[in-house]
RNA sequence: GGGCAAUUAACUCAGCUGGGAGAGUGUUUCUUUGACGUGGAAAAAGUCGGGGGUUCGAGUCCCUCAUUGCCCACCA
């Protein structure tokens, strides 16, 4: 092994070997149990960011362990066409080129989009490889590839024929200048100073008025009701009556709806279903007429009476003037509010009603609610179960048409002659009803989530009846982000149930986000992001990966810190050097299995400690508590294996070389395997240097516990060593100064004597004198008392005896505090009668021990 | 506005079903003994956001207030 840890020398090489040997690929094998993860597909145009580095690594860690555990582990990678955001990006690019999608036309635009897909396809995948991800790259999928297109088509036809797809009305964002509907993402909200106009509407057959407040008086021409809150005492008696719509002189009803806030404005809202999304919903609930008064060009239309032909802005002025004249304008309040603007041309968005395609959700949602409620599908973090059920139980029909030019087609053809709608798995040549060839295809595209919803199916072969699908589906765990629980996770669940009759996955891990070091979300606009690739170049992949997990609760947000990556790199260095030590010791030795050698006390101790770690780590892995598993592992490696065992082994190597080498190799091999899912490269690199290794650590077997030993003596030895070191530090004895020590053993001399080497070596003791009784101790020294032995450190020349006395008194005082605490607890009748007996026994034992220790110490003062 | 989280040592965060407050960083002291100075040994440091309550016992459960963050919906 090289002297220094330099990941750049082996990471790429190792990954190529793995690829070459096809370790990542999984094939149907009935003799093995499958374990499947489908990767949430990143947007094809995206670059690797810290969020991927975290989320995808979670999956890699899980899948690598499962593979080692003997499962037929499959992790399917893929990318998403993300129609809307890709189209948005391309449009910006076209803008720079001085053109637009309208100028290009649909065909040319589609070509450009496909070029984009090709251009970007490679980038993020290459970066994922650099991260070390063990996906089955042969199965790389794309949400727009042939199979996905067929899957989408099949499902669409299935839903349509089942009567679950229908055409309905919906409010969309309309830009009157661009003459096109635009997506929510393209709407910029800006705070605009405006007014709140208070208008009075006369109540039918009465001289009373009701006052409404509005920011958009011009829409009153489309009013079909006014609404109040049903709980509002002021208006309760008016509900059901009609009011006269001023200027229009039409009767409209007063309705009651929870949507109305009593405290805002006057507590009365005019309802214009055709020009406001909320009003539209209210209109649906109350079956109101929809009157469109603003045309697609932003000009008041034929429903606007004398205002027809005016622009929205002019109409507003005119209407306000007319209201003033007719004394129906009560007051004008200054008010600024958020107004949506078209991002491209900055025109104010007009919400207008339009025809869209919907999926009827009620029947689909039902079984999807059930499987989560009964735990068939389990959110590893219970809080998200609520998020999910809340959404599903109040599910609205899913609008699946989008007014964009790229993405999956909506396979609906309409006969221009007889109006027949044709929805089939193939493109029709003629109308089945009137045999006309005059057919029009739907121009709108499908919502991106429509194909995403099928992802766990399509990646495994759907719509074909493939063996893979039979074998690997349902998958095991879905790892994804919390903001898409409803948009994506929910849709995958009902899709899986509807088309496969089976849930798509049984467990869901929702990971937190990696925030920037300033505690805010990493974002391009803030410029506070860190490029994972930079970190890899600087510290290596393993350091980046491990730093994202060590001590982090993966379900909660964490903060990125380069300092931590650096410290993790130091840990890698530690692993490297400890391994070098092991390799140096075992050089030329015949390494036996630990079951074949006579283990020393230290060997038994580290094996038992390792058993504990295997146990803890397995439990944490099974709960997907990866961050805690990582910190258990680093704690063991650094604090147990390096700081203690390797030091002990330096003593044993003389008298117990055989067992020492066997144990060093066994423990190192085992801990490397446990670490491998987190830090695949360094572990592989070292593993291949160790004796008796398999072809690769990544296909070696996951560790199992060896037998446990009684380690009380070693634990006490460690305690003794710590105490002596403390005493030395307390007395400012430099570490390099050797001292003498006297030791009195009360019984079990043979066993305790096995630890003398350890104590001497680790405490800088030149000579350990064994005594038979108390009286033989030198007079002025530091007396250290333990269960079974007393140690005296004759540091007379260095010790100020009054200070030593003070130290002892301080110790006694501490013990007094402990004793008092125990006694108080044990004298509390409530505690005695209600606390569990084991706890009480424990407390009693502690009390006895402390009392005995106190007596010993008092003798020394 | 609705929903959800968080508030623990100077900093970043752990603390599972209630039973004597933990880690890492930073600070201070000592240390170049052949794996490692990207190291080793030790020390100091907390009224667990405030206030109530349940309990023999609360960082942990309940209520309430405050602050911060996230998601969703965006208001006539």
Image (spheres, rainbow, N blue to C red):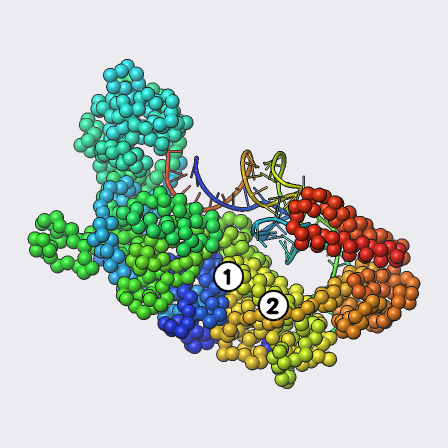
The dot on residue A3 is none
User: Residue extending furthest front?
Assistant: A833
Asked whether the viewer can see residue A842, the reply is yes
Q: Are marks 2 and 1 in contact (CB under 8 Å)?
A: no
Residue depicted at x 15% and y 51%:
A421
**Dot 1, crowdedness within 10 Å: few (<14), some or many (≥20)?**
few
Q: Is residue B45 left or right of residue A290?
A: right
Nearer to us in this view, A773 or A460: A773
**Which part of the image, by quadrant, shows the C terminus of chain A?**
bottom right
**What residue is shown at x 18% (from left), y 57% (from top)?**
A424
Question: Above or below — where is A326 with respect to A750?
Answer: above
Residue A611 bears which disc, if any? 2
* Pointer 2 chain: A
Residue A616 appears in which quarter of the rendering?
A: bottom right
SS at badge 1: helix
Q: Nearer the viewer, residue A426 or A709?
A: A709
> Residue A467 in the image: x percent, y percent?
32, 69
Q: CA distance from mark 2 to mark 1?
A: 17 Å
Q: Residue at x 24, y 49 (%)?
A: A165
The spot of residue A98 in percent (x, y) is: 29, 52
Residue topped by disc 1: A622
Do discs 2 and 1 belong to a common subunit?
yes
Q: Is residue A485 visible?
A: no
The tag earlier along the polypeptide, 2 or 1, is: 2
Helix, strand or loop for disc 2? helix
Instruction: Please state which of residues A261 and A72 is positioned toward the viewer in this rendering.
Output: A72
Give A718 or A278, whichever is nearer the viewer.
A718
The chain carrying label 1 is: A
In x, y percent, where is residue B46? 68, 45
Percent of width and height locating residue A72: 42, 70
Say which residue appears at 28% left-offset and 56% top-offset.
A407
Q: Is A436 left or right of A213, judged from the image as shown?
A: left
């Amino acid at each position: 092994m090289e002297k220094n840890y330099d990941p750049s020398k082996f990471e790429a090489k190792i990954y190529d070997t793995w690829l070459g040997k096809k370790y990542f690929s999984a094939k149907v094998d009935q003799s093995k149990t499958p374990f499947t993860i489908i990767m949430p597909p990143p947007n094809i145009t995206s670059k690797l960011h810290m969020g991927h580095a975290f989320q995808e690594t979670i999956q890699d860690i899980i899948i690598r362990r499962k593979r080692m555990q003997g499962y037929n582990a499959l992790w399917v990678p893929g990318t998403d066409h993300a129609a809307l955001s890709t189209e948005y990006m391309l449009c910006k690019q076209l803008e720079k080129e001085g053109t637009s999608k309208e100028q290009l036309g649909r065909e040319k635009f589609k070509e450009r989009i496909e070029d984009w897909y090709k251009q970007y396809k490679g980038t993020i995948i290459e970066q994922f490889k650099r991260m070390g991800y063990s996906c089955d790259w042969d199965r790389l999928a794309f949400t727009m590839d042939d199979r996905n297109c067929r899957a989408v088509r099949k499902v669409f036809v299935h839903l349509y024929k089942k009567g679950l797809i229908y055409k309905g009305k919906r409010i969309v964002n309309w830009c009157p200048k661009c003459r096109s509907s635009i997506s929510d993402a393209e709407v910029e909200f800006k705070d605009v100073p405006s007014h709140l106009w208070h208008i009075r509407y006369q109540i039918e057959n009465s001289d009373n008025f009701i006052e409404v407040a509005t920011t958009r008086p011009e829409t009153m021409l489309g009013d079909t009701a006014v609404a109040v809150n049903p709980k509002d005492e002021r208006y309760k008696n008016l509900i059901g009556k009609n009011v006269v719509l001023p200027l229009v002189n039409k009767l409209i009803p007063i309705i009651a709806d929870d949507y109305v806030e009593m405290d805002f404005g006057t507590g009365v809202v005019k309802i214009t279903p055709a020009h406001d999304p909320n009003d539209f919903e209210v209109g649906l609930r109350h079956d109101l007429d929809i009157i469109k008064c603003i045309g697609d060009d932003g000009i008041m239309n034929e429903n606007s009476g004398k205002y027809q032909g005016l622009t929205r802005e002019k109409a507003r002025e005119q209407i306000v003037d007319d209201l003033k004249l007719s004394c129906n304008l009560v007051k004008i309040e200054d008010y600024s509010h958020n107004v949506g603007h078209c991002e491209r041309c900055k025109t104010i968005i007009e919400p207008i009603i339009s025809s869209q395609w919907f999926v009827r959700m009620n029947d689909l949602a039902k079984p999807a609610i059930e499987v989560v409620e009964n735990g068939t599908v389990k959110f590893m973090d219970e809080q998200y179960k609520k998020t999910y059920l809340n959404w599903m139980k109040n599910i609205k029909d899913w609008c699946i048409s989008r007014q964009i030019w790229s993405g999956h087609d909506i396979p609906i053809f309409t006969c221009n002659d007889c109006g027949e709608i044709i929805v089939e798995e193939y493109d029709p040549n003629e109308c089945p009803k009137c045999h006309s060839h005059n057919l029009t295809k739907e121009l709108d595209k499908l919502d991106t989530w429509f194909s995403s919803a099928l992802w766990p199916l399509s990646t495994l072969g759907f719509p074909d009846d493939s063996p893979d699908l039979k074998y690997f589906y349902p998958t095991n765990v879905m790892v994804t982000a919390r903001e898409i629980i409803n948009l994506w996770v929910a849709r995958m669940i009902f899709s899986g149930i509807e088309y496969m009759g089976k849930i798509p996955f049984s467990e869901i891990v929702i990971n937190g986000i990696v925030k920037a070091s300033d505690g805010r979300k990493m974002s391009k606009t803030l410029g506070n992001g860190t490029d994972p690739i930079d970190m890899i170049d600087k510290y290596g992949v393993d350091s980046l990966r491990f730093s994202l997990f060590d001590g982090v609760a993966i379900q909660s947000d964490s903060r990125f810190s380069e300092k931590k990556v650096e410290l993790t790199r130091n840990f890698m260095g530690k692993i490297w050097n400890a391994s070098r030590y092991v390799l140096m010791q075992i050089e030329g030795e015949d390494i036996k299995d630990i079951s074949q050698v006579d283990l020393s006390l230290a060997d038994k101790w580290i094996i038992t400690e390792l058993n504990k770690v295997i146990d803890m780590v397995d439990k944490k892995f099974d709960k997907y508590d990866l961050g805690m598993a990582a910190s258990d592992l680093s704690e063991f490696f650094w604090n147990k294996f390096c700081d203690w065992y390797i030091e002990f082994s330096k003593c044993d190597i003389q008298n117990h070389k055989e067992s020492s080498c066997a144990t060093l190799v066994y423990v190192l091999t085992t801990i490397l395997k446990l670490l491998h899912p987190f830090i695949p490269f360094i572990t592989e690199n070292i593993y291949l240097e160790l004796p008796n290794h398999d072809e690769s650590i990544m296909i070696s077997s996951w560790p199992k516990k060896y037998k446990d030993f009684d380690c009380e003596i070693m634990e006490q030895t460690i305690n003794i060593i710590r105490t002596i070191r403390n005493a030395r530090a307390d007395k400012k004895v430099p570490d390099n100064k050797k001292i003498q020590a006297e030791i009195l053993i009360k019984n079990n001399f043979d066993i305790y004597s096995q630890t003398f080497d350890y104590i001497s070596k680790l405490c800088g003791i030149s000579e350990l004198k064994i005594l038979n009784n108390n009286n033989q101790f030198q007079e002025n020294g530091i007396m250290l008392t333990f269960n079974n032995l007393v140690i005296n450190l004759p540091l007379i020349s260095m010790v100020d005896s009054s200070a030593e006395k003070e130290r002892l008194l301080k110790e006694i005082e501490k013990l007094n505090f402990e004793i008092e605490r125990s006694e108080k607890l044990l004298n509390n009748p409530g505690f005695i009668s209600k606390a569990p007996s084991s706890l009480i026994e424990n407390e009693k034992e502690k009390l006895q021990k402390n009392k005995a220790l106190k007596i010993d110490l008092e003798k020394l003062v």
